[in-house]
């Protein structure tokens, strides 16, 4: 499986989690690496990604609370999530989109539940 997310779980409001997106079979610097999430009954929502110039972009809903990072040597992307809220409850997905040929990989997701 080219992309595998991990690190989800149950956390109390205000808590933190760090998600990992481990890749295999390709190098992440050739891809736009992004995080998305999907809550029950809703569409998939963009959260964060790196631009071609290595600038991190964030959705307004997570700006200041979530941080995307990556380890090119390990071909892994992370999403540090702080100050979690119940509305952050969703399945979180990692996406790899090749910069030039459009090849796209999605992981199967990892569940994050924020509840007291």
Image (spheres, rainbow, N blue to C red):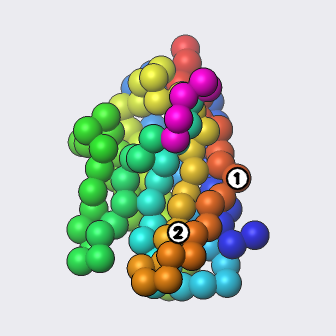
Please tell me which residue is depicted at 70% across the width and 53% down the height of the picture. 108
Task: Find residue 52 and report its horizontal and vertical position in percent.
Answer: 29, 76
Q: Regarding mark 1 in the picture, which secondary structure is present there?
A: loop
Task: Find residue 77 and report its horizontal and vertical position in percent.
Answer: 49, 66
For this orientation, the residue located farthest to the top is 116
Q: Is residue 21 left or right of residue 30?
A: right
| Quarter containing the C terminus | top right
Task: Find residue 92 and report its horizontal and vertical position in percent.
Answer: 56, 44
Determine which of the numbered discs, if any, sits on residue 108 in the image: 1
* Label 2 crowd (10 A; few <14 / some 14-19 / many >=20): many
Front residue (pair 6, 104): 104
Please tell me which residue is depicted at 27% across the width and 57% down the height of the picture. 57
Please tell me which residue is depicted at 42% across the width and 30% down the height of the picture. 84
Please tell me which residue is depicted at 65% across the width and 49% down the height of the picture. 109
Distance (Cα) linking label 1 and label 2 = 13 Å
Q: Is residue 101 above or below residue 34?
A: below
Task: Find residue 19 and report its horizontal and vertical position in percent.
Answer: 54, 52
Front residue (pair 89, 19): 89
For this orientation, the residue located farthest to the right is 1
Is any atom of residue 30 visible in this view? yes
When asked about the image quadrant of residue 34, the answer is bottom left
Q: Is residue 87 above or below residue 92?
A: above
Determine which of the numbered discs, if any, sits on residue 79 in the image: none
The span picked out in magenta is 40-44
Residue 43 belongs to the span the image colors magenta? yes
Residue 42 belongs to the span the image colors magenta? yes
Q: Main secondary structure of the magenta part?
A: loop
Of the residues under marks 1 and 2, which one precedes in the sequence?
A: 2
* Label 1 crowd (10 A; few <14 / some 14-19 / many >=20): some
| Quarter containing the N terminus | bottom right
Residue picked out by circle 2: 96
């Amino acid at each position: 499986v080219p992309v595998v997310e991990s690190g989800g779980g149950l956390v109390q409001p205000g808590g933190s989690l760090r998600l990992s997106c481990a890749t295999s079979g390709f190098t992440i610097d050739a891809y736009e690496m992004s995080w998305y999430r999907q809550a029950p009954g809703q569409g998939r929502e963009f959260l964060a990604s790196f631009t071609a110039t290595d600038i991190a972009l964030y959705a307004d809903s997570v700006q200041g609370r979530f941080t995307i990072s990556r380890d090119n040597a390990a071909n892994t992307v992370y999403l540090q999530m702080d100050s979690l809220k119940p509305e952050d409850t969703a399945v979180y997905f990692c996406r790899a989109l090749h910069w030039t040929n459009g090849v796209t990989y999605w992981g199967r997701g990892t569940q994050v539940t924020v509840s007291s």
